[in-house]
Image (cartoon, rainbow, N blue to C red):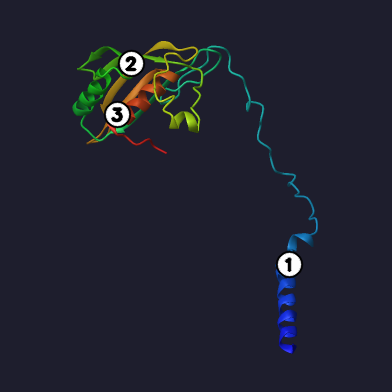
Amino acid sequence: MKKNAYVLLATSVLMGFALTGCGMFRSQKSWETAKQEAPLEIPPDLDTPSASDALVIPPPGANQPTANGATSRFGKNGGIITDGFVLKDSVDDAYRRVGEALQSGSFGRLLAHDDAAHTFSVEVVASEAPTRKPGLFGRLLGRGKSDNDTQAPGAAAHQVQVTVTGSGTDASQVRAQGNAAAVAKLVDGLRDRLGVAEAK
């Protein structure tokens, strides 16, 4: 009987520790005893920069392209944007590969090409409206698989200029310029088709 009493006492003590958790082992929190410090004082001889031109609204029509050709988007009309990627090929080989991908017709209609200047003109149907991605069940059941957004609200044909130029000694730069939505659709499709990883 004495043995059972010790087991019962030990079990009740262990249960008491288990129910209280680690509360009895907690240390004093230093932030609970912290005191308010004096506010930071700015030296009187410190000059503050002028903020008068910080938020100047440009006049209409002042949407000039940046060094890489990008312009901002405003209003209902999408701005002109330039985007691209680099292929590890010579200019001629990259031009040939891009031409083969564009001739498949899955990105848009190839309007013209200039072999001497290494350029293509492509008509791409794209929508400025954001497309809604299918949910889990839609993806499982195969709905929303098509990349064709001709039925999207506001879908219209936009002309995109694609240029292939040299980039270093053994690479080529593929640049697309035109409507932002059309350029994004075309560049993403070309990256996928040509096996180019998107830069993070």
Q: Residue at x 73, y 85 (%)?
A: 6
Outermost bottom residue? 2
Q: Residue at x 66, y 31 (%)?
A: 50
In this view, 165 is above or below 199: above
Q: Which residue is mark 1?
A: 19
Outermost front residue? 1
Q: Residues within 10 Å of mark 1 (few under 14, many from 20)?
A: few
Q: Position of residue 178 (x, y in %)?
A: 40, 17
Which numbered circle lies on residue 69?
Answer: none
Snapshot quadrant of residue 169 = top left
Q: Which residue is mark 3?
A: 193
Pair 1/3: label in front: 1
Which label's residue is closer to the chain start, 1 or 3? 1
In this view, 168 is above or below 52: below
Which label's residue is closer to the chain start, 2 or 1? 1
C-alpha gap between disc 2 and disc 1: 68 Å
Indicate left or right for 180 with 107 as reference. right
Q: Which residue is mark 2?
A: 108
Element at label 3: helix
Q: Position of residue 61 (x, y in %)?
A: 53, 12
Indicate left or right for 155 with 32 as reference. left
* Amino acid type, callout 1: Leu
